Amino acid sequence: MSWADTFVELDKAIHDRASFDCGEEELNTFLHTQAAKHMEVGVSRTMLLPASAPHPNGKYPICSFYTAAPSSISRETLPETLAKKLPHYPVPVFLLAQLAVHSEYQDQGLGKITLIKALEYLLEVNAHMRAYAIIVDCLNDNAEQFYLKYGFEELCKYNGRTRMFILMKTVAQLFPYISYN
Ligand SMILES: CC(C)(COP(=O)(O)OP(=O)(O)OC[C@H]1O[C@@H](n2cnc3c(N)ncnc32)[C@H](O)[C@@H]1OP(=O)(O)O)[C@@H](O)C(=O)NCCC(=O)NCCS
């Protein structure tokens, strides 16, 4: 089955959360049971790419998704050359909290598309409310390799995971049609 043309916000009445399986239980469980609740209470937003046609139950399978939320880091976690230009209070960032592709659709470039869409979306948000960088807490070495490929750098260890970051000004270079300054 092919995927649709555009990413849309998760809607539990339309999207078939239960059938999503990316091979990582933690990410599956998040989408099945938490993503919609987190949107309802206003702590994160989940965007997804549905399949182009619905299941027999009328709901659309989810091909990939990402979840983003505002967050902050301490400047001390950043490399010295960056840190010295920043204030001592918490530095605003966007957290790319989750990103996954359904196993059926992996290795076809959809992870790359989903990441690019997440970066584009966060740069658009940044035009209204500034953030210094995008951070991601990698679930495993594979995720780390995936983000390294796209310019993320290691920031620190956080809750036993490798936290990586990419500066918003670097993301802006990828999308010259989105206002940055
Ligand atoms: C990691 C994941 C998002 C990649 O999605 P995908 O659709 O399979 O990846 P793509 O086909 O778009 O591949 C894009 C590039 O990343 C590389 N890549 C894909 N999976 C990778 C992995 N696990 N480790 C390292 N590189 C990887 C591909 O080789 C490709 O590189 P290329 O363009 O030079 O050929 C997907 O495998 C997934 O959802 N995994 C389970 C959840 C997970 O680990 N999420 C990470 C966030 S914590």
Image (cartoon, rainbow, N blue to C red):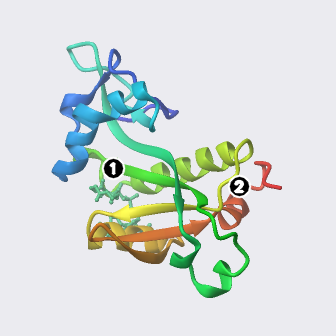
Q: Above or below — where is 88 with respect to 38? A: below
- Image location (x, y in percent) of residue 118: 52, 48
> Looking at the rendering, which quadrant does residue 67 occupy?
top left
Mark closest to the chain's N terminus, 2 or 1: 1
Q: Is residue 154 above or below residue 21?
A: below
Q: Is residue 108 above or below residue 88?
A: above
Instruction: Say which residue appears at 60% left-offset and 48% top-offset.
Output: 122
List the residue tagged with mark 1: 100
Residue toward you, 63 or 147: 147
Name the residue furthest bottom. 80
Residue 178 is at least partly visible in this image = yes
Which residue is rendered at x = 41% and y = 27% of the image?
Answer: 41
Q: Disc 1 residue type?
A: Ala
| Left or right of residue 33: residue 87 | right
Whether label 2 lies within 8 Å of ligand 1 gets the answer no
| Marks 2 and 1 in Cβ contact (< 8 Å) | no
The percent position of residue 136, horizontal first and vertical second, equals: 43, 61
Are there few (<14), some (14-19), or many (20+) residues within 10 Å of tag 2? some
Q: Nearer the viewer, residue 103 or 28?
A: 28
The image shows residue 117 at horizontal and vertical percentages of 54, 47
In the foreground, 9 or 95: 95
The answer to whether the residue bearing label 1 lies less than 8 angstroms from the nearest atom of ligand 1 is yes
Label 2, label 1: how far apart the Cα atoms are: 22 Å
* 28, 150: nearer the viewer: 28
**Mark 2 is on which residue type?**
Phe
Question: Quadrant for ligand 1?
Answer: bottom left
Q: What secondary structure is marked by label 2?
A: loop
Which label is found at residue 175? Answer: 2
